[in-house]
Image (tube, rainbow, N blue to C red):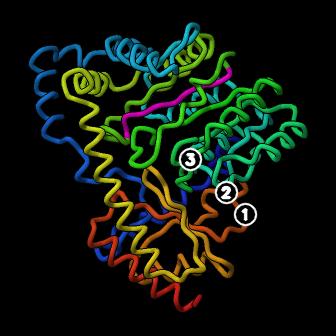
Amino acid sequence: MNAFSHRVSGLQPSAIREILKFTADPEVISFAAGNPAPEAFPVDTIRKLSDEIFAENPIGALQYSVSEGYTPLRDYLKADLAKKGIFKGNDNLIITAGAQQGIEMTAKCICNEGDAIICEDPSFIGSLNSFRSYNAKMLGVPSDDEGIDIEKLEQTLKENRRVAFLYLIPNFQNPTGRTMTLERRKQVLELAYKYDILILEDNPYGDLRFMGEDVPSIKSLDTKGHVIYMGTFSKTLAPGLRVGYMVADADIVSKAIVTLQVSTVHTNIWAQMLAHKFLTTVDFEQHLEGLRAIYRKKCDLMLNNLKYKMPGSIKFTEPEGGLFIWGTLPDGDMNYFCKKAVENKVAVVPGNAFNVDEKAPSLSFRLNFSTPTDEQIEKGVDILAAVAKTMYK
């Protein structure tokens, strides 16, 4: 007998994880992942620092630790984030197993069953599934090139009084690659104050800006404690470390600590010690510049190939950072396009995988430029173009 809880009985496997099964075929070129580039991993440095940790403090790396996180890492992050206006007077900080755990903990702490969670539509599937697992009422608000649609956001807030929080990825959004403008961020914050709701600001890609000017985080603009901020080292060090962090009002963090105690007890302490050692003994800004150079080159290569090879009626976003490009067909059957692509050995993610309403139609698809090699990018776009030209001129 399989009697699943109401919270999980309706959950489906991640569409991206299902698509990635096709990439087990070595002939398939994957534009479907969201992984850092293999050449971006500082393997030798991590090996050296890990050896130092086990030489200097092996028991500290292997023993139980406090749920809040490794104190030297927390202190470093508090000071660094305070300089950026992100960590403020009544805030606290907890180390999480990547941003994903912090996102899930936020839903657990804030959302009662039946409460609404507002998201950009489309949005990150991992977060959407976290929210669905708490039986939240999912409300999607469309975005344009400047960010979430303010008029439609306010209309949604007017029509739904039980809103737990608003979930946003302002920098190089997954899946679209777009960045929310400063003006739009200010407008969103004003609505949060007006309707007395929290904002969950997810910033996994912010350090990977390779074009344009930095835009202040929503958290740094917040003067009333309405923003919960999620950061991670998954895209800047290594996702396998599973080290992220949540910054929020101390009362919220105190509840997050309790939820962590009843799930993972604490985030991997060796990985936290390693992250701290990297931040304090390696030139982290120089490391980030190296990552930005890798992704700038890969993004330019993919965009140039798309521009010159794909039918002009198919539109693509031009991200200033992050890992993703969002393609949109003029009409027709997006799922057919994605199916024909994978049949021809190129995997892309159908846009409806990111919809708040999973059954809503989509003409879009997501491309990842960080994981494939340069040769795979060129060959993969050739294949996509051949498929597209059977559908469009």
CA separation, marks 1 and 2? 8 Å
Q: Is residue 100 above or below residue 172?
A: above
Label 1's element?
loop
Main structural element of the magenta stretch: helix, strand or loop? strand
Q: Is residue 288 above or below residue 293?
A: above
Q: Disc 2 residue type? A: Asn
Label placed on residue 359: 1
Label 2's element?
loop
Q: Nearer the viewer, residue 310 or 33?
A: 310
Mark 1 touches mark 2? (CB < 8 Å): yes
Counting residues from the start of the chain, the first of labels 3 and 1 encountered is 3
Q: Report the residue that reaches farthest toward the top.
A: 89
Q: Is residue 389 left or right of residue 267?
A: right
Label 3's element?
loop
Counting residues from the start of the chain, the first of labels 3 and 2 encountered is 3
Q: Position of residue 225 (x, y in %)?
A: 66, 17
Q: Residues within 10 Å of mark 3 (few under 14, many from 20)?
A: many
Q: Disc 1 residue type? A: Lys
Residue at image mark 2 = 355
Q: Is residue 278 left or right of residue 207?
A: left
Q: Nearer the viewer, residue 126 or 87?
A: 87
Quadrant of residue 264 within the rendered picture: top left
Q: Disc 3 residue type? A: Thr
Mark nearer the viewer, 3 or 2: 3
User: Where does the magenta region start and end?
Assistant: 226-234
Q: Report the residue that reaches farthest toward the front.
A: 213
CA separation, marks 3 and 2? 18 Å
Residue at image mark 3 = 179
Q: Residue at x 9, y 19 (%)?
A: 55
Task: Tell me if residue 274 is in the magenta stretch.
Answer: no
